[in-house]
Image: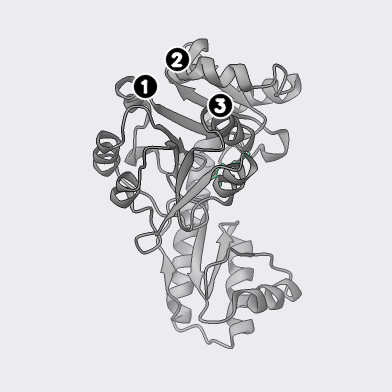
Amino acid sequence: QIKTQFGFDHNQITLGNGSNDLLEIFARAFVSEKDSVIYSQHAFAVYALVTQAINAEAIEVPAKGFSHHLEAMAAAVKDNTKLIFIANPNNPTGTWFEEAEFEAFMQKVPANVIVVLDEAYVEYFPEKFNSLKFLKQYPNLIVSRTLSKCYGLAALRVGFALASVEVTDYLNRIRQPFNVNHLAMVAAVAALKDEAFIEKSREVNKAGMAQLEAGFKALGLNYVPSHANFILVDVQADPAETFNKLLKEGVIVRPVGIPNHLRVSIGTEAENAKFLAALGKVLGLEAKA
Ligand SMILES: *Cc1c(COP(=O)(O)O)cnc(C)c1O
């Protein structure tokens, strides 16, 4: 199904037990203890974890606002750099970059450095970015996708990576031969074919995003514009404390280690409304129309 839908042959596809499994495979395939790995501040927490797991040097490049600073990341490459992780859109910030910026980045990165483009949330903004065309141009690029987010199959654990034949060969040497179970694969194939579901998810997400943005504005709170299925809001208060207060109101959000900010997932209209009311209550803010 991946082959017919994305136009890549089996020798360019690597399956993962969720894309977390893949992120670890990438690091283990290409990085050893004396090497370094680059990722951004405020990026997906797993990049730091897989780097630490192989005891490699971690180079965390300061973010630009809440976004990846791609120019600085390319400039941070050292002789021992083997791999760069980037997420587009990023988790936990929801920020994104466009094709031109990515292309300029790829041109600066040496061809012997693997670039992992983690597209866990790409289904939520397909019109902005076509990563797959870059795979033909850059044999050192790996594009990582997951069935866990827009497809809604997180508990089944299916992810896949697209890359050059050479890179895919290395990844499959590291991958456990039966890392994805058969039932998960059957479900994944059905999910990939279900374009109507993705379309609906996108619509619900878009409407929910607009609802939360309007709600934050009414409460006088700043937020970070997002292209994912969550949004980072500046609650102007301690995130852990606000998280606990919201929990008592029956709403679970995520403190993500960014001062004053909480990440909240886009829900249904009713869930979003419940969250906004609870947020106003715990922060002591009055919504203004
Ligand atoms: C959720 C997420 C993943 C991986 O999720 P899996 O369930 O392991 O596929 C990877 N990258 C980012 C940025 C994510 O947010």
- Badge 2 marks a residue whose secondary structure is helix
User: Can you give x and y, in whole percent of width and height, for residue 275 in the image?
Assistant: 62, 69
Q: Which residue is mark 2?
A: 166
Q: Which residue is mark 3?
A: 29
Q: Residue 139, which numbered label? A: 1
- Pick the residue in front: 154 or 68: 68
Q: Disc 2 to disc 1, how far (Cα)? A: 8 Å
Mark 3: few, some, or many residues within 10 Å (few <14, many ≥20)? some
Check the image and report above or below for 69 versus 175: below
Q: Amino acid at mark 1?
A: Pro
- Badge 1 marks a residue whose secondary structure is loop
Q: Disc 2 to disc 3, how far (Cα)? A: 12 Å
Q: Earlier in the sequence, mark 2 or mark 3?
A: 3
Q: Which dot, 1 or 3, sits closer to the camera?
A: 3
Tell me whether circle 2 and circle 1 mark residues in contact (CB < 8 Å): yes
Q: Earlier in the sequence, mark 2 or mark 1?
A: 1
